[in-house]
Image (cartoon, coloured by chain):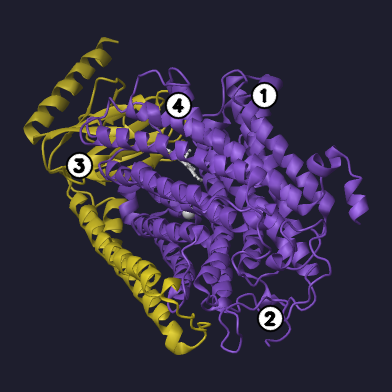
Chain colours: A yellow, B purple
Amino acid sequence: MTIFPENVSTYGQEIDNLFWLILVFAAIAFFISLFVLLYPLIKYSSKNGKRAEYITGEKRKHYKWITYALVALLLSDFVILYVEHDTWGNIESVPAISKNDVHVGIIARQWNWIFVYPGPDGVLGTRDDVVIDSMNSSLHVPINANVIFELRSTDVIHSFFLANARLKQDALPGRTVMRWFNITKPGKYDISCTQICGILHSKMRNYVLAETPEQYKHFTDSLYNANKVVTSSK
Amino acid sequence: MENLHQNKSFWSKYVFSTDHKTIGTQYMIMGMIMAGVGGYLAYVFRYNLAFPGKSIPFYGMLGPQAYNAFVTIHGMIMVFWVGMPVLLSALGNYLIPIMIGSDDMAFPTVNMLSFWIFAVSALVLIASFFVPGGAFGGGWTMYPPFSAQGYVNHNPNFFTALFSGTSLLILAVALELVAMLMGGINFLVTTINKRAKGMTPWRIPVIIWFINIAAVIFMFSVGPLVAGAFMLLFDNVLGTGFYDPHRGGDPMLWEHLFWFFGHPEVYVLLLPSLGVLAEIVPVFSRKPLFAYKTVIYLALLSAFLSVLVWAHHQFVAGIDPRMATFFSIGTILISIPFAGIFLSYMATLWGGSIRMKLPMLWAIGFIGLFLVGGLTGLFLGSNTFDIYAHDTYFVVAHFHYTLFPDIFFGFFAAFYYWFPKFTGKELNAKLGKWHFWLTFIFFNGVFFLLFFNGLAGQHRRINDYSSFSLISREPYQTFEQIATVCAIGLMLSQFIFLYNFITSFRKGKKAVKNPWESTTLEWQSDSPPPHGNFNPYPEVHRGAYDYSLPEAKEDFTPQNVPNVN
Ligand code: HEM
Ligand SMILES: [Cu+2]
Ligand SMILES: [Cu+2]
């Protein structure tokens, strides 16, 4: 049994490492505190027959220990903040554009994920975009490429969760959020909705299908071709 | 005075009573009944989680709509109809007048009204299960637009929209907040105006300080929520669009208003129980509370900081990423005063003469469990890790490790401690021990393994995980089953408490005036205290924690003792 599901994104490992770092701090604090809490129950039990000392805790020699502990806590907090800061910036801001990037639109709707492919021109929001609205169609992405997505919702709040990439982002109606991921291993990964959104919230699952660049090209080619046929026959 | 008291009818004595102790009892009983309802709901959906698709004993089949509603109302009940009445109202009503040496609250009639508005709010809440469509099922956070669709769904019938599960829930919460607001004003005015002679601010017991600080935090943060709740109600029944982006509204507005109240609210719930610990730990350590004044300053500091952290619930909501760092720092900062308060309690133990009686057992258990809750908060306060952990069972386990000890361990500690005072009877200590150990073990059994489910990516508020390959696998399904078996054990263990409560109340041994040898004023009155609490009224000569004074022969010197020897 592993603690986390397999990580397949470029930045996922940083999140896992952050967990272990915080766990170290938390475990140290936990065991010290537990000792400070439980040891006196034995050492200073009334069964020993000794009268309690009159300590009000206002003298420096008594309260200095608490000050040290609080400073240590504050310092470890800021160490965590310092370490995580770059990861946060990395995940939450879209990387500089390169020509290998893939742009897609993800639209949440009660109760499915709708995917928008940019069409042959590679640009979202143009006439050749292809919208796939089906429970049975996963989001195809190439591996080792930055997938930059625009996230929207058409109705209520949903949340896009790709556990294997360690990415989560709410989709609020009325705004568009840009996020990205880069998956390094081919496979089929669960997308779940993590914001309660109604009766079929539990069923609001789709997949990211990460493929080799060749497979991906094959997929988009046939998608765009099929779509062209439809448009021209109109 | 005694005559007047005896002439009262049953109604004015027990039902529409203005006596602070009776009102405290009413709040406590009401909170316990609601805990039963909230616990039953938890039993039903926990059973479903362990055995999806099976018929649930004492309920039947649970569909997705009912699952969502049960989870939502469970959370609502535990926070607003158990935590608030039991910790704030019951403890505040029982303890404030008697611990400051007064006869009653400043506004006894407002006090009575507060309880009855609270009782109505509970009825409205329960009624929401029985309207067409059933109770609201969008989570206790009630995020719009999901919670703002009444007008569209019932278009445009005002009355069906008003009597929908959503609107009734909003109304119930609004009424509950009004009741708490009336109580809070009463607490403050009483504490400021009705103290016994000599009860200067720095002689007031910590619990009274903390209840008042909690009342201030509550009053300060609740205003925006009430305004927000009315906007939500209007969206539902009048068709306004405050939270509807298609008409210029913004659902994020609600998230801010809700959490601007919602986070301080957890401190409103925490402070009264921390006050309980501050009373119990010194008594059973026979030592003054460590750094009494600092503890109070720390609580005041936390009250100030409590309104600077709310958006840590919105790290992945789409707020500006640069804002998140600010709220992370706020969250880090507020952990310091609370850590300080807990450390002061632990320091109180060192050098004491510790009596491991029942109230102390609950107090130590509280601190131990809260340690897990508080330290797992480190993970969630980290905005980066929260990207992954948000809305998973890691969060569910975390907040249960804070709220469960806070509400239940805090209440039981208080209950076992003050029961002899307010009933004049002793509780059965052996049953009390069973109650403690079973509750402690089963509680850990329910929630500890769920941390792992959360880390495995299990998201919350899901009635059926069969679609998710990451979760519907071992060992996570077994963990769900262990959690459910323990949850049932946890609930059954509470019957030991009920049995102990009832039998001790009816035929327990007579309690003495001051069984734990405490210094605070309530213990200097009779058990149970008469109407009016004291006769004659006490004069206060010292702080609340004069244990083991070197110059005194006894190891405790009550607050109303003028000079030692
Ligand atoms: C009897 C013991 C309890 C059990 C077995 C229990 C179980 C649970 C579970 C499993 C959930 C998550 C359900 C889901 O997300 O699908 C939950 C949610 C929640 N619980 Fe409890 N709980 C208990 C006591 C409490 C207490 C004492 C509180 C105190 C405040 C509390 C407050 C909440 C809240 C606020 C939620 C969130 C509701 C929501 O998602 O909208 N619970 N509970
Ligand atoms: Cu959804
Ligand atoms: Cu918070």
Q: Chain of mark 1?
A: B
Provide residue A195's location: percent of width, then percent of height.
Answer: 41, 36
Q: Amino acid at mark 2?
A: Arg
Which sits earlier in the primary sequence, circle 4 or circle 1? 4
Report helix, strand or loop for mark 3: loop
Distance of label 3 from label 4 (alpha carbons)? 27 Å
**Residues marked 1 and 3 touching at CB (< 8 Å):** no
Residue A152 placement: quadrant: top left
Residue B283 placement: quadrant: bottom right
Q: Circle 2 is placed at which residue position?
A: B542
Q: Circle 3 is placed at which residue position?
A: A5
Q: Chain of mark 4?
A: B
At 45% from the left edge and 17% from the top edge, which residue is drawn?
B60
Horizontal relation, residue B539 to residue B467: left or right? right
On the same chain: label 2 and label 4? yes
**Labelled disc at residue B163:** 1
Provide residue B320's location: percent of width, then percent of height.
Answer: 42, 53
Q: Nearer the viewer, mark 2 or mark 4?
A: 2
- Callout 1: CB less than 8 Å from ligand 1: no
- Callout 4: CB less than 8 Å from ligand 1: yes
The extreme top residue here reads: A233
Q: Amino acid at mark 1?
A: Phe
Provide residue A119's location: percent of width, then percent of height.
Answer: 23, 29
